[in-house]
Image (tube, rainbow, N blue to C red):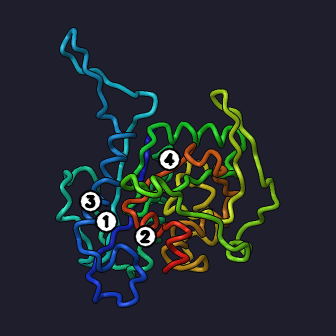
Amino acid sequence: MRLLVAIPHFYAEASWSPDGRWHGSVGLGPAPRITALSACIASLHQLYGPAQYTVEHATGVASPANIQTAGAIDIIVCTTGSHHLLDRLPIPVGSYTHRPTTAPPPLLGFECHAVLREGLGRYDYFAYLEDDLIARDPWLFVKLGWFTSQLGDEALLQPNRYEVGPLGLVHKVYIDGDLAPQITAPFQDLSVVPVVTGHLLGTTIEFRRTRNPHAGGFFLNARQMQTWASRPDFLDRETLFVGPLESAATLGIMRSFRVYKTAVESAGFLEIEHFGTNFLSQLRRRDDAARS
């Protein structure tokens, strides 16, 4: 497998954006952002890169492992101006390629779309990931391939984003619950093939057209990437879905494919970690909330 990943990365002090619209990229201090981006890049190499081995104690030889799921991977991190932390990452510079741009920060994600288009014809999968997403599933692309083999390239399976934290009230939370129907209605018709049931490894899994296709990123096979890049609205830089960050991650795929997510009963079938506990920390017991 040949994989191309484009990551928009931005960091500035709180004074740069008083409204905090850039979420964790603004004003929280550099340490969490350094940790998040380092983990994002490292996880991709660890799960899908070629340098995976098993130690044979009898011979003292290390032999290649996971050759069915590992392959070549190129990661390109897009930045704008000097608003980034790449020079402070505790990972080898060669583990990614820096693509500096002059794009307005809210539109940086669209520069990543251009990077992905440049890779057409040279990769099997194309990924867009916000810089705080951490892959944990070595079989993610196997599952995506199985899904499209069942439904065709017109259907796209999005991962469920989650956060985990200390063993308190909630151990794990999936953070992209349903949006109000009118938010995505201009871009997708959920009545078209709304539910699909699959059978895998002796388990029945339900996939549903989602009222919240946002996952902070996406994974497209080569045919899907070609389809999307061929659309007249590709790189139109529209920000019609919630805002520029959400639109860069989601609007294009929502307009191009039937987007599914695994039903909550099997949410972990395809998932990706969102760094930190921003959403998890907001959960409280109902009785505590009532007293506040």
CA separation, marks 3 and 4?
Answer: 26 Å
How packed is label 2: few (under 14 Cα within 10 Å), some, or many (20 or more)?
Answer: many
Examine the image and state in which quarter residue 254 appears. Answer: bottom right
Which residue appears at 45% of the width and 33% of the height? Answer: 69
Which residue appears at 58% of the width and 78% of the height? Answer: 242
Q: Nearer the viewer, mark 3 or mark 4?
A: 3
Secondary structure of the residue carrying tag 2 is helix
Which residue is identified by label 3?
A: 35
How packed is label 1: few (under 14 Cα within 10 Å), some, or many (20 or more)?
Answer: some
CA separation, marks 2 and 4?
Answer: 18 Å
Which residue is identified by label 4?
A: 125
Specify the amino acid type for callout 1: Arg
The disc placed on residue 111 is: 2
Outermost top residue: 58
Specify the amino acid type for callout 4: Tyr
For residue 242, above or below residue 127: below
Q: Return the residue nearer the eye: 143 or 290.
A: 290
For residue 5, above or below residue 52: below
Q: Nearer the viewer, mark 3 or mark 2?
A: 3
CA separation, marks 1 and 3?
Answer: 20 Å
Residue 198 image point, x, y percent? 71, 38
Report the side of 197 relative to 272 (left or right).
Answer: right
Specify the amino acid type for callout 3: Thr
CB under 8 Å between callouts 1 and 2?
A: yes
CB under 8 Å between callouts 3 and 2?
A: no
Secondary structure of the residue carrying tag 3 is helix
Which residue is identified by label 1?
A: 99
Report the side of 170 relative to 267 (left or right).
Answer: left
Residue 5 image point, x, y percent? 41, 54
Sequence-wise first label, 2 or 4: 2
Q: Nearer the viewer, mark 1 or mark 3?
A: 3
CA separation, marks 1 and 2?
Answer: 9 Å
